[in-house]
Image (cartoon, rainbow, N blue to C red):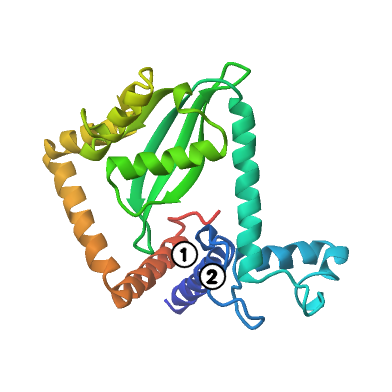
């Protein structure tokens, strides 16, 4: 019994250490860390990547972070944002080059982010020179209002920066919201007024989601499962204490399963 408890404790310690590594390495792909000081356990992906590169290349290590000149570290928040902006602009220019003079379609959706700001995601679809259909995420724009006119104005502004003409639009893909699909005043109607070939198609992914939701309501077991799952997520997510308790219970359960050879660790 004591040996079994000891094995559980060892496996539990391994699970916690593995979880710490996951938090440090993955970090939800956040570029900056909330604490980037030298004493922090996780300084953000940007600085952690610099540390990682320095550990493998002595030439890099001599020039970055604490070894860099005091006024030339280039790790400030402004520099990180500028690097991101340069990378994003490079990607968009590459997509624009691939489109060339070809016709293209637009796929748009908006959602509120964690900072409570409304964001509009822009995806461009086109056929490349090799004849393959491509859909590329192009930009994420903050919009002050979700009215059709505002969304169109913001989209036209982005397209004009990269010299993408409204007349070359050959398709529009949105969800079923009235501000998007409205026959008279929706975004699809406004673009259709400017370009008669910009046909609107209800997003197939959204249609599939609606179909699955409608179908699941007709099957009692599935309906009850998702109802209970939603309640659990809401209850646990609303409290940090409940989240920590659930995580601790899951770690103990996983340690027991590993000890009894019922769970592979990889």
Q: Nearer the viewer, mark 2 or mark 1?
A: 2
Q: Pinpoint residue 57: horizontal percent, then vertical percent.
A: 84, 62
Q: Earlier in the sequence, mark 2 or mark 1?
A: 2
Secondary structure beneath dot 1 equals: helix
Q: Residue furthest right?
A: 59
Circle 2 residue: 20
Task: Report the residue at 42% width, 76% height from top.
Answer: 1
Q: Position of residue 34 (x, y in %)?
A: 53, 74
Judge left or right: residue 217 versus residue 104. Answer: left
How far across and how far down the image is residue 226, in percent?
Answer: 21, 49
Residue 242, quarter of the rendered image: bottom left
Q: Where 12 sits versus 108, above or below?
A: below
Q: Which residue is mark 1?
A: 259
In-front residue for pair 262/31: 31
- The circle on residue 151 is none
Q: Residue at x 18, y 55 (%)?
A: 228
Badge 1: how crowded within 10 Å, few (<14), some, or many (20+)? many
**Residue 248 placed where, x, y %?**
38, 73
Alpha carbons under labels 2 and 1: distance apart: 20 Å
């Amino acid at each position: 019994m004591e040996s079994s408890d000891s094995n559980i404790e060892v496996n539990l310690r391994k699970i916690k250490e593995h979880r710490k590594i996951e938090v440090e390495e993955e970090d939800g792909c956040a570029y900056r860390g909330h604490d980037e000081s030298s004493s922090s356990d996780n300084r953000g992906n940007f600085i952690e990547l610099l540390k990682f590169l320095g550990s493998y290349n002595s030439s890099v290590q001599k020039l970055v972070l604490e070894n860099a000149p005091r006024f030339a570290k280039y790790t400030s928040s402004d520099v990180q944002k500028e690097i991101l902006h340069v990378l994003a602009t490079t990607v968009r220019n590459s997509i624009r080059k691939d489109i060339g003079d070809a016709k293209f379609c637009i796929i748009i959706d908006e959602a509120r982010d964690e900072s409570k700001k409304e964001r509009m995601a822009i995806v461009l679809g086109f056929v490349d020179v090799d004849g393959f259909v491509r859909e590329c995420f192009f930009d994420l724009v903050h919009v002050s209002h979700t009215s059709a006119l505002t969304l169109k104005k913001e989209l036209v502004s982005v397209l004009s920066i990269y010299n993408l003409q409204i007349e070359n639009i050959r398709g529009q893909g949105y969800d079923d919201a009235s501000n998007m699909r409205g026959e008279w005043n929706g975004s699809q109607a406004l673009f259709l007024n400017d370009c008669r070939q910009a046909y609107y198609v209800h997003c197939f992914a959204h249609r599939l989601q609606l179909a699955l939701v409608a179908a699941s309501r007709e099957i009692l077991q599935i309906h009850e499962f998702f109802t209970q799952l939603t309640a659990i997520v809401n209850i646990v997510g609303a409290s940090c204490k409940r989240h920590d308790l659930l995580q601790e219970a899951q770690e103990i359960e996983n340690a027991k399963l590993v000890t009894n050879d019922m769970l592979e660790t990889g």
